[in-house]
Image (spheres, grey):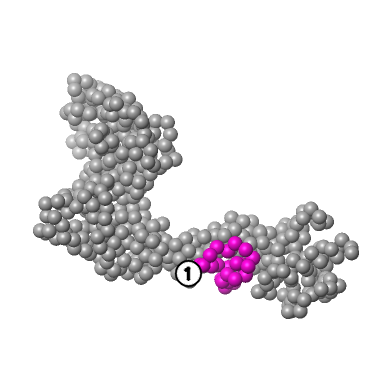
Amino acid sequence: MSALKHTLLFFITAALNIFITADIYCARTESASFTDVNAGIAQGLKSNFSSTFKNLSSIEIAAVSTNTSSSFMSRSGLFAIYPQPAPINGFEALTISSHSVSLAWTAVDADFHTKTGTVSRYLLKYSSIAAIDSDLDFANAALYSQNWIPLEVEANETKIVEGFNPATTYYFVIEGVNEHLICGERSNIAYALALVPLAPMNLQITASGNSVLLNWLSPAGYDNRIGFNDREHPTYPYEVMGYRVYRATDPVNGDWGFIAESSSSTLNWTDIADVDKEYFYYVKAFNMAGISIPSSIRGNIAKNLYFVSSDNTSMIEIPNESGALFAGDGLDQLDFYTVNISSRPQDIEGRILNSVEFAAYKGGLVKEEGFKLTNKAAITMYYKKFGGEIVPADISSDYKKISLYYFNNAKWLQLYGNVDEENQRIQLETAMLGKYQIRAVERLGAFVADFSGLSNRMLTPNGDGKNDTMVFVFDNPRQSVTKGKIFDIKGAFIAEMTEGEIENSLSWDAKASGNIVPGGVYIYQLESEGQVYNGTVVVIR
């Protein structure tokens, strides 16, 4: 038998053994034994194939073509060799609403071998049962109807597909189809993941006798910061299915116990507790996909707010009197903020022992850069716990070994902080959220100030929020009284420095008696424990 008949017989035998449910089927074939070792051969069935094709035993009625000429469409057989579209790689899916998915890919050639032509359409299929891993899976998957006109080759295709159930994982696969009704190979699988809700908002707590009343607002969206279609009325059960209440005796290391579950429409719970004992509470929202992270944590006595990282290595405690940004009488989630604490293990190396970002999200949805608290809160970072490991292994005198650093979007500032050796943590009073690190560094155990503690040496007091103020941070482990003054270049007194937004810091807003000073060079002076530190800053107007 001739080599051509051997080749055609291989194609036909392969075609007879595959599962065919649509008008077309194709697959790329390549082998060192083929004449075309560059994979320029593809196989496919013409659109009007009949049931008798399955019993085809003779290759005499097969038509063969090896080019893309105008006569290519003229074929008399039920089986033909045609050019195949290029496969689609880098297929991506992103859930963008409760029922919509955004798909993205790069437009491909109609003929992968000659790299010519534009595909005529796309074949998009999806499944919520299992991944589409084979041709059989693809044949059985649901077809998404669409009338897209494919873009030119190499263009970025982006389409929003709708009508999908929230809180459900979908698997998408796409193929290009050319003018001969031949489709390309299956793309990679793109996943649209099920989404759990954000944490409940605006947790409030009221204690009366042994009754502790908790109130909260529903979350405004999913944990990937996509808002619900109607945040005032989350859809049951896909967006919010209900709430679960937890209680402990410590906000960080407490043994949290589940105590109650409420419906999606019940935004409160009353606990009966020991009147003389402080308990801490948080609430989680859940839907069909899973359960949220905890809300803010509140105590029944002090009622301070706590936000704790998922790995329990970092925390921020906001005094109750400073909590208006996080809890209050409003009913709109966007009136309040949450604090997300994310560990940054990619930063851990050398002297960096822990790295964390504290970020404020309005309504839990929108990150607000440069967020400042109305008053100072206590940031706590544990320096011996990271991913279950103890680092460093030997600290004989903690206050001389570790320090907190803060990134002010220009440089890392050493903020020092107060070391709690018994609880293996370092704490700092600050109104600034952002990136913080614990670093191994020598400290003297006495008042220390130098130019590295200066946030910026150029002041531009124009009200744009950038370099309007200079902040000087110093180490003051003995909590000694520290004074700061500003003088002009001739030594004349200009202003007193005021308490900064960070513990152990002083600041100057380039003003004297409420008025912005003229541009020029000014001298700052810090004095504490009998030591005086001087330096210069420049005001630019």
List x then y, in percent, for residue 342. 37, 46
* Residue at left offset 17%, top offset 28%: 481
SS class of the residue under badge 1?
A: loop
Residue behind mark 1? 164
Q: Is residue 136 magenta?
A: yes
| Viewer-closest of 232 and 511 | 232
In the rendered structure, the answer to whether residue 237 lies left or right of residue 47 reads left
In the image, farthest residue toward the right: 1
Quadrant where the C terminus lies? Answer: top left
List x then y, in percent, for residue 466. 34, 41
Q: Is residue 108 magenta?
A: no
Q: Is residue 458 above or below residue 250?
A: above
Query: Amino acid under label 1?
Result: Phe
Quarter of the figure with residue 404: top left
* Residue at left offset 42%, top offset 41%: 345
- Does residue 282 appear in the picture of this structure? no
| Viewer-closest of 400 and 227 | 400
Quarter of the figure with residue 393: top left
List x then y, in percent, for residue 99. 45, 68
Quadrant where the N terminus lies? Answer: bottom right
Q: Is residue 386 above or below residue 67?
A: above
Quarter of the figure with residue 420: top left
Within-10-Å neighbours for mark 1: few <14, some 14–19, many 20+:
some
User: What count of labels does the image hold?
Assistant: 1
| Residues rendered magenta in the picture | 125-148
* Residue at left offset 68%, top offset 74%: 23
| Viewer-closest of 537 and 177 | 177
In the rendered structure, the answer to whether residue 64 lies left or right of residue 98 reads right
